Amino acid sequence: MILVKNAMTQNVYHLSLENSISELIDLMSERGIGSIVIVNKEQKPVQIFTLRDIPKIFSANLKDNKINTLLSVLRKDEKDLIKVKPNQHLIVAMNLMNQNNISHLPVVNKENKLVGILSMRDLLRHFPGIVFTDPLTQVNNRMYLDIIRAKIEKSNVKLCILMIDIDNFKNINDKYGHLVGDLVLKEIAKIIRTSIKTYDELIRYGGEEFLVILYRCDIKNLTSIGERIRNSLKKIKFTKYKNLSVTVSIGGYAYNSEGDIYEGIKKADQAMYQAKIAGKDRLILWK
């Protein structure tokens, strides 16, 4: 398990509320820094400035050159600042970055004092593989498909493709909330992972879509594996939500190294939509 403290930078460039905006801009330009944390007298972070804030700074109508004034004009205050703790799971921090469209997170201790900073650039440098992992479900994401595409298309190994879509997922989010929807996605990913071989590929392809690539697989195995996954997912029980049930529609396609893997995925996707049209909760193979 990778924690925030394993990926954060401890030597943080920071300024106080009483420093000038000129110092802020000079520090960024002279040191080539992507982010500067603003702290109060207790060394608690109250805001963070990144390079994307520079245009806002220059366009702000300021009465003086103080960072404190700038925060007031830009309506940035401590309540808006998202922070993480050193012992939090790195995936939690990545989720916060993704959900809030930010690239930097101040790291604070138990007293809420600044101890480090976590940046997406550092994550990619220290843990390059993490960019290919879906932070919610912990399976590979769609970018990973580009990495294995060449390997698949150059090999002569027969493989099969499953496109799995959760039925009525929007209704689950609307009725139970997005946190429960996230719980459903994580549970489904876990069940699918345990239903296939360790060397098979599982990718979160879209919001509620999962792509499975089965190596050394023919059409007979495709049907049995697809049905096993479908039936396993129907058995999922949620203790706190007894009325919540999950079904999936699955499209399958037997790919015989005939070229572009994306064409094979497209055919599995078309078969999945046929399963939706036919009434959902079923497997249909592309013909």
Image (cartoon, rainbow, N blue to C red):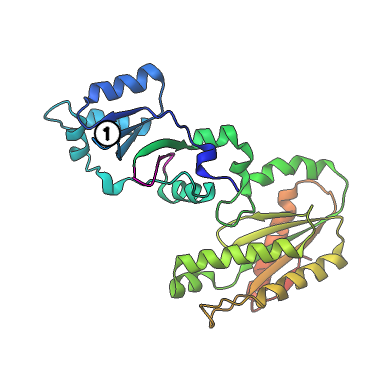
Toward the viewer: 4 or 258? 4
Q: How many marks?
A: 1
Toward the viewer: 229 or 80? 80
**The furthest residue to the top:** 30
- Left/right of residue 271 with respect to residue 84 in the rendered view: right
- The residue lying at 49 percent from left, 37 percent from top is 120
- Left/right of residue 70 with respect to residue 143 in the rendered view: left
The quadrant in which residue 251 appears is: bottom right
71 magenta-colored? no
Neighbor class of circle 1 (other Cα within 10 Å; few <14, some 14-19, many 20+) is few
**The furthest residue to the front:** 111
Compared to residue 252, the image places residue 105 above or below, namely above
**The furthest residue to the bottom:** 243
Toward the viewer: 77 or 249? 77
The quadrant in which residue 271 appears is: bottom right
Regarding residue 270, the answer to whether it shows in the image is: no
108 magenta-colored? yes
Residue denoted by label 1: 56
Q: In which quarter of the image is the C terminus?
A: bottom right
Circle 1: element type: helix
Query: Where is residue 87 shown, x and y percent of the image?
Result: 49, 47
The quadrant in which residue 246 appears is: bottom right
Regarding residue 182, the answer to whether it shows in the image is: yes
Query: Where is residue 132 shown, x and y percent of the image?
Result: 62, 44
Query: Where is residue 59 shown, x and y percent of the image?
Result: 22, 31
Compared to residue 58, the image places residue 247 above or below, namely below
- The residue lying at 45 percent from left, 32 percent from top is 10
Query: Where is residue 36 shown, x and y percent of the image?
Result: 35, 30
Q: Which amino acid does label 1 sit on?
A: Lys
**The furthest residue to the left:** 63
Residue bounds of the magenta highlight: 102-112
- The residue lying at 79 percent from left, 67 percent from top is 225
